[in-house]
Amino acid sequence: MDAIPTQFTCADGVTLKGHWFRPPGKSGPPVIVNAATGVKAAYYHRYAAFLAGHGFPALTYDYRGIGLSRPAKLRGCGFTWRQWGEQDMEAALRHALESEGENPMVVGHSIGGFLPGYAASATRISRLLTVGAQYAYWPDYRRGDRLPFFLKWHVAMPALTLALGYFPGRRLGWLEDLPAGVALEWSCRGARMEARLKEPQRSDILARFAAVRAPMLALSVSDDPFATESAVSRALDYYRSADRLKVMLQPADLGADKVGHFDLFHSRHAERFWTGTLLWLRDGINPWPERIFL
């Protein structure tokens, strides 16, 4: 399945680049694939091609500051998670609507499953599938990983970001480079996403999340150190008007010894996990009802 380059412009003038994967004969609505923080959209191309192979036009795109949407100079760039949602997600939704003429679905990995609620057009989303979705509140990390993760992501990352004007993730082998605003928002996130906002911005954002009514299936895996039950629940609580199902899989459910946070979009999971996601996207069926948690 060929990747067709595309680009679209956000309301604030920033241009984003991505790819469409189009089926030979369309049978389903478009699917927008939202990446995790610090992960290029190219990582999700295999999954997008899989979706297209089953009749769903699939759009991947890089957020501002990442991959194909990285500016010539990242140092001093103030892009934030909030802009990824309010501007980039919004632009992707409008691009999908204009290109395909019907309401899109969204598959969001990690922060990509939280970003839709920021977008004004998220009310047009017809179905949501989140994978390991959370927003990095450190007490939610898996117990044995909290201290090393706190030192890595909430001490070292902000210190390096403040010193350099961006986070040099690629040089360290810690995902991709990040804009300073994204890195600092990750490092300083509290128990409530909106806690640092002033009115009326706080109420506006909460209302946007509450306006989303698309059915949601939130998937995670028990050995994911980021997307624990408390982390997934914390993120999903913002989507209070949506019908939400939370599922915690075991690696053995997927024929694996370990999975973690980043592995599910590797093609080795096509037969079980990817095929299971089709049931949700196509029919609204949770393939793993025995793994629901409250």
Image (cartoon, helix red, strand yellow):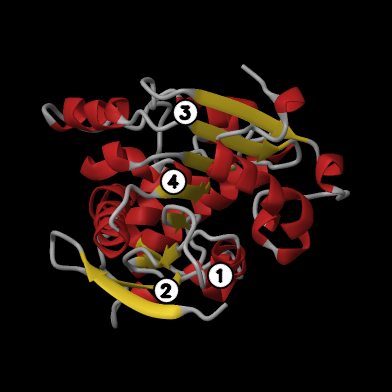
In which quadrant will I find the N terminus?
bottom right
Camera-nearest label, 2 or 3 = 2
Q: Under tag 1, what secondary structure?
A: helix
* Residue 205 % position (x, y): 23, 32
Camera-nearest label, 4 or 1 = 1
Identify the disc placed on residue 19: 2
Residue at (60, 66) in percent of width and height: 53
Q: State which tag comes first along the sequence, 2 or 3.
A: 2
- How far apart are the alpha carbons under marks 4 and 1? 28 Å
Q: Residue 5's quadrant in the figure?
A: bottom left
Q: Which residue position holds label 4?
A: 187
- Name the amino acid, label 3: Leu
In the figure, is residue 157 to the left or right of 17?
right
- Name the amino acid, label 2: His
Q: Under tag 2, what secondary structure?
A: strand
- How far apart are the alpha carbons under marks 2 and 1? 8 Å
